[in-house]
């Protein structure tokens, strides 16, 4: 039995145990990693009571969300995903940014490979450009106002044309306000204060400062209130045509050879409702998101899960009558 103090949801679930600053990381097919008592096992994870000798490394989970996990292993940056960044791309990032400085890491799509938010509020984007029969990749610093939190709605493993690419952020200068944009480029133009910038798609100021922002567009404020927005709008763009030869060919290459799909059926992204709602939950201490669910732990130790289980979204359930917080305990395998 261990006291569950902290968790994250995603392809890898991360748990902080009560015996010190340590993580237990459990994955599906990508990596199983157990970090105990300040050290860690890289490779197949032994059981919690396994005392066998193994390679010990310091591991910090940077981001774990929607099938993409970025971790710091000693002084190295690692990425776990269906289509992860390769070693050369990660080296471009760490040549400019020390992994210990990375606060958030977000997997993007198409020419924008990934975004990295540093502790000082500075945003970097890993870009790939095609030219002269070859592609080049570079890390670009985005000038502008420092950012406290940033979240992207899209998931790269899915068709990016079918999922909103909406992005939300909180500036350090205004910690109570969340601004949302329907795509990445308008957000960059607004952040850089370009002449061509447009106003955010939606902006809302809450009563307390935001301390956590997730890709499912759930925000946790200092008072413990969870605010959600980004539900699908009732009016959506028309469906794409039934036949698309270029997409069928790309899909066949993905199935046969595992090539990433670059050519999807043409369709505007889904339309979202940006009006925020406060959830009827007790004060929440920890908030995480992954897959189609959000998870929260209250200050009293209750564990709540909500997501897309029915037409009534969100549907909230107290999944564990036992305390799941610092003062309580729960069993897990």
Image (spheres, rainbow, N blue to C red):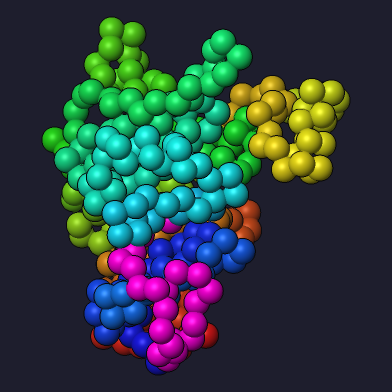
Is 272 on the left-hand or right-hand side of 75? right
**Residue at the image position 56 percent from the left and 40 percent from the top:** 156
**Residue at the image position 20 percent from the left and 59 percent from the top:** 223
Q: Residue furthest top?
A: 195
> Is residue 50 within the magenta segment?
yes
Is 128 on the left-hand or right-hand side of 288? right
Is 176 on the left-hand or right-hand side of 66? left
Main structural element of the magenta stretch: helix, strand or loop? loop
Which of 234/16 is in front? 16
Give percent across and percent down for residue 31. Answer: 53, 65
Quarter of the image with the N terminus is bottom left
Which image quarter: residue 59?
A: bottom left
Question: Is the residue 225 above or below the residue 324 in the image?
Answer: above
Give percent across and percent down for residue 53. Answer: 41, 84
Question: Is the residue 196 above or below the residue 293 in the image?
Answer: above
Which of 39/27 is in front? 39
Which image quarter: residue 225?
A: bottom left
**Residue at the image position 27 percent from the left and 35 percent from the top:** 96
Q: Which residues are magenta?
A: 41-65
Q: Residue furthest left?
A: 173
Which of 214/208 is in front? 214
Question: Is the residue 242 above or below the residue 117 in the image?
Answer: above
**Residue at the image position 34 percent from the left and 68 percent from the top:** 57
Give percent across and percent down for residue 212. Answer: 29, 53
Residue 226 visible in the shown view: no
């Amino acid at each position: 039995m261990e006291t569950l103090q902290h968790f994250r949801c995603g392809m890898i679930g991360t748990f902080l145990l009560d015996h010190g600053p340590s993580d237990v990381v459990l994955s599906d097919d990508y990596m199983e990693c157990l970090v105990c008592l300040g050290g860690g096992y890289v490779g197949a994870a032994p059981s919690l009571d396994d005392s066998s000798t193994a390679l010990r490394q310091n591991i910090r989970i940077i981001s774990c969300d929607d099938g993409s996990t970025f971790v710091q292993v000693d002084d190295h940056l690692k990425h776990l995903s269906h289509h992860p960044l390769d070693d050369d791309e990660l080296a471009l990032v760490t040549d400019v940014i020390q992994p210990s400085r990375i606060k958030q890491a977000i997997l993007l799509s198409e020419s924008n490979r990934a975004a990295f938010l540093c502790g000082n509020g500075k945003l970097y984007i890993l870009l790939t450009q095609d030219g002269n029969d070859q592609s080049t990749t570079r890390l670009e610093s985005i000038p502008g106002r420092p950012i406290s939190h940033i979240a992207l709605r899209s998931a790269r493993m899915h068709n990016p044309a079918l999922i909103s690419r909406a992005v939300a952020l909180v500036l350090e200068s205004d910690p109570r306000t969340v601004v949302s944009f329907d795509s990445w480029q308008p957000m960059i133009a607004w952040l850089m204060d370009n002449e061509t910038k447009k106003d955010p798609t939606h902006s809302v100021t809450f009563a307390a400062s935001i301390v956590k922002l997730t890709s499912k567009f759930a925000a946790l404020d200092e008072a413990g209130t969870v605010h959600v927005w980004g539900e699908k709008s009732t009016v959506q763009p028309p469906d794409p045509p039934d036949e698309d030869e270029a997409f069928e060919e790309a899909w066949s290459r993905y199935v046969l050879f595992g090539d990433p799909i670059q050519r999807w059926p043409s369709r505007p992204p889904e339309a979202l409702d940006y009006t925020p709602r406060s959830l009827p939950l007790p004060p929440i201490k920890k908030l995480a998101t992954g897959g189609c669910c959000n998870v929260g732990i209250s200050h009293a130790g209750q564990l709540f899960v909500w997501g897309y289980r029915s037409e009534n979204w969100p549907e909230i359930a107290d999944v564990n009558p036992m305390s799941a917080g610092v003062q309580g305990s729960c069993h897990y395998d």
